[in-house]
Image (tube, grey):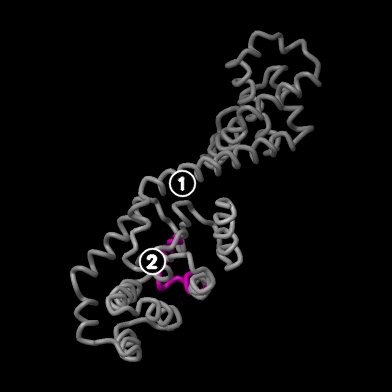
C-alpha cells in the first residue's frame, strides 16, 4: 500500500512536469503505453529531482500522519502510476541520477569555496617538508580525533617520500578541550623547530593534558621557559583562532579534512594520498 501511494505521488509529479513543457501540447490520453513509458522516462531523466521531491513529499505526509483523503487519480495519471509500478528501476534510476547531480554540485561549490580562500588555506604557519614544495598538502585535524591519529604516520611517510611536497598543518579544537592544549603545544614547539616531533608525540600520547605536554616538551629538550611563554602567548591563541576562522569559512564539518594544491582531497590511505600527488605530477609532464 505504501509503495502504491508513493508511486502515485511520483506519477502526479510527472504529470505536473508534462503540463509544464511542450508535451502538454500532445494528446497524452491517446498515446500507447510504450510511448507513454518513454515519455515518463524522458521526463525523469531530464529532471530526476521530480522523483526526489515526490519521495520527500510522501514521507513528509506520512510523518505528519495526515488523514486527508487521497487524491483520486485520473485515468492518465493511473496509467503513469502503473508504468512506475511495473518498472520500479525508472524511479530508482531517477533518484540515483539526482543524488549524483547533487553530489557533483556540492563538490563544485566546495572547490569554488576552497579557491576563494586558497591563500588562507595554504598559509603555512605550521608546516613540514619542503618549504618551497610544488605540491602543497593541507591537513585540518584535531589532536583528539582517532582518524587523525591514524592519518599522522601516513602524512609523515608522504613527507619522507616526496621531496617536492610541503604539508601544512591546521589544528582545530572540535572534539575536546584537550585538543586546544595540544594545538598550543604544537605551535610552541614550532617556534623551536620541533613541530613535527611534537605532532608525532601528541598523536601517540593516549591522554593529552598539561602535565603530559610538559613531559613531552622536556623529553624533546626544548627551552621550557620559552616553550611555556609561547604556549600561553596571545600570538599562539590568535594563530589558532585564525585557523578555526578559515575552517568555518570553507564549511569544514569533519576531520581530517585534506586539501591538495587548493582542491579538496578525499583520501584516507597513504596509497591514495601518494596517487593524488602522482596524478598532479603526471599532468605536468
> Measuring 19% from the left and 73% from the top, which residue is drawn there?
233
Residue extent of the magenta highlight: 136-150
Instruction: Give the percent coordinates (x, y) of residue 160.
Output: 51, 74
> What residue is shown at x 24% (from left), y 87% (from top)?
224
Q: Is residue 184 left or right of residue 141?
A: left
Q: Nearer the viewer, residue 245 or 261?
A: 261
Q: Is residue 147 visible?
A: no
Quadrant location of the N terminus? top right
Q: CA distance from mark 2 to mark 1?
A: 24 Å
Q: In the image, is 149 to the left or to the right of 244?
A: right
Q: Which mark is residue 131?
A: 2
Q: Is residue 141 magenta?
A: yes
Asked whether 230 falls inside the magenta stretch, the response is no
Q: Is residue 54 visible?
A: yes
The picture places residue 219, in percent across and down from the top left corner, at: 35, 91
**Which is in the foreground here, disc 2 or disc 1?**
2
User: Looking at the image, which is closer to me, 210 or 186?
Assistant: 186
The residue at which mark 1 appears reads as 111
Amino acid at each position: 500500500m505504501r509503495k502504491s501511494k508513493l508511486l502515485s505521488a511520483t506519477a502526479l509529479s510527472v504529470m505536473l512536469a508534462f503540463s509544464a513543457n511542450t508535451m502538454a501540447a500532445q494528446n497524452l490520453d491517446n498515446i500507447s503505453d510504450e510511448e507513454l513509458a518513454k515519455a515518463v522516462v524522458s521526463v525523469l531523466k531530464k529532471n530526476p529531482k521530480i522523483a526526489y521531491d515526490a519521495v520527500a513529499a510522501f514521507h513528509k505526509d506520512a510523518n505528519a500522519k495526515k488523514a486527508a483523503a487521497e487524491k483520486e487519480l485520473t485515468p492518465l495519471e493511473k496509467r503513469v502510476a502503473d508504468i512506475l509500478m511495473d518498472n520500479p528501476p525508472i524511479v530508482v534510476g531517477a533518484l540515483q541520477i539526482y543524488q549524483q547531480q547533487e553530489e557533483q554540485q556540492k563538490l563544485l561549490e566546495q572547490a569554488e569555496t576552497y579557491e576563494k580562500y586558497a591563500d588562507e588555506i595554504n598559509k603555512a604557519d605550521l608546516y613540514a617538508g619542503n618549504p618551497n614544495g610544488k605540491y602543497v598538502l593541507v591537513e585540518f585535524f584535531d589532536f583528539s580525533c582517532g582518524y587523525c591519529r591514524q592519518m599522522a604516520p601516513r602524512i609523515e611517510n608522504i613527507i619522507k617520500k616526496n621531496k617536492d611536497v610541503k604539508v601544512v598543518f591546521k589544528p582545530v579544537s572540535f572534539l575536546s578541550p584537550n585538543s586546544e592544549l595540544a594545538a598550543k603545544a604544537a605551535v610552541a614547539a614550532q617556534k623551536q623547530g620541533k613541530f613535527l616531533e611534537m605532532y608525532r608525540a601528541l598523536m601517540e600520547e593516549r591522554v593529552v593534558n598539561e602535565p603530559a605536554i610538559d613531559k613531552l616538551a622536556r623529553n624533546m629538550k626544548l627551552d621550557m621557559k620559552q616553550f611555556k611563554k609561547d604556549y600561553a602567548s596571545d600570538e599562539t591563541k590568535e594563530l589558532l583562532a585564525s585557523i578555526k576562522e578559515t575552517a568555518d569559512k570553507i564549511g569544514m564539518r569533519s576531520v581530517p579534512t585534506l586539501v591538495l594544491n587548493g582542491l579538496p582531497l578525499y583520501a584516507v590511505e597513504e596509497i591514495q594520498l601518494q596517487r593524488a600527488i602522482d596524478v598532479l605530477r603526471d599532468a605536468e609532464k
